[in-house]
Amino acid sequence: MQYYICYPEGKHKALTLSYDDGKIMDKRLIELFNQYQIKGTFHLNGGLFPDINEQADQERIPSTEVKELYFNHEVATHTYTHPTIERCPLPVVVDEIMRDRQQLEQLVNYPVQGLSYPNGSFSKEIKEILPALGIEYARVVGSSHHYGLPNDWYEWQATCHHNQRLMEHAKEFVSLAKTQYLYLFYVWGHSYEFDNDQNWCLIEEFCEYIGKREDIWYCTNIEFTRYMANAKRVVFSVDGSIALNPSAEVIWYRINGKIFSLKPGTNYLDFSNK
């Protein structure tokens, strides 16, 4: 029998976006995401909120607006003060990540477990300590220009920056039809770049084109990470008739061409055509 992990509802295409630094332009971007039912991850610096740090950039979102603004999206860490962490002693890196997590968690009331490396800076030693700091994934700077899944969750490379042939990638992604593969389209950037480059029309066109599609799973970075981890924890009996899902999340599989939703706990699978 053939067993294929699927995304929720049996889908095989997923879209996620990731934006850094928490500037006020996030408001306009989130309005677009919400309008077209797109989800994003926003990496924030807990030590640089202007209502907490008088020396911080006043164009950053204040801490008092974080919970409401980013509702239905993911808030993730970008370190507390945005240093180039590869140049920092490891104890300082630990402090930067943990202080940021703590600050952000007090605002959003859930565990913050995603990271994007500030200034794209990281090292092998930094990657190795991240699991112990409660970090589930870390996004790097750079683009793969493909739609595959990450080989290394702590060196996660996006498909493209929004200034890198975004609509060309979007049209290619929409056309992908081979259900034997899982596809992930991951876009990253900074919302203030749309002001700087005067190209809000680009992301508006993108969201209108790719949003609200029935065959795409719209997810945050952490939703994608956790789902894939939970999907790989599913255990099947030798004859394939029983599936144990040890997670608290419904997991979807395609088995011999038939879509199954595996609820938490033990599932008895019916392969009849009824």
Image (cartoon, rainbow, N blue to C red):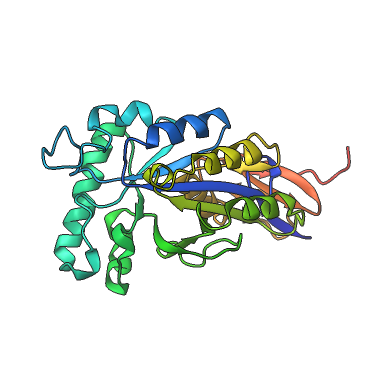
Can residue 246 be seen by looking at this rendering? no
At x 45% / y 64%, what residue is drawn? 142
Residue positioned most to the bottom: 124
Determine whether 64 is above or below 194 in the image. above
At x 46% / y 66%, what residue is drawn? 152
Determine whether 153 is above or below 27 in the image. below
Q: Quadrant of residue 56?
A: top left
Residue positioned most to the left: 54
At x 52% / y 47%, what residue is drawn? 16
Residue 62 horizontal/vertical position (percent): 24, 32
User: Horizontally, is 232 left or right of 20 in the view?
Assistant: right
The residue lying toward the viewer, choosing from 30 and 10, is 30
Residue 81 horizontal/vertical position (percent): 19, 51
Image quadrant where one finds the N terminus = bottom right
Looking at the rendered structure, the number of numbered marks drawn on it comes to: 0
User: Horizontally, is 58 left or right of 244 in the view?
Assistant: left
Image quadrant where one finds the C terminus = top right
Residue 122 horizontal/vertical position (percent): 30, 67
Residue positioned most to the front: 198
Residue 53 horizontal/vertical position (percent): 13, 39
At x 77% / y 53%, what residue is drawn? 177
Can residue 150 be seen by looking at this rendering? yes
Q: Quadrant of residue 211?
A: top right
The residue lying toward the viewer, choosing from 219 and 198, is 198
Q: Quadrant of residue 120?
A: bottom left
User: Horizontally, is 119 left or right of 55 in the view?
Assistant: right
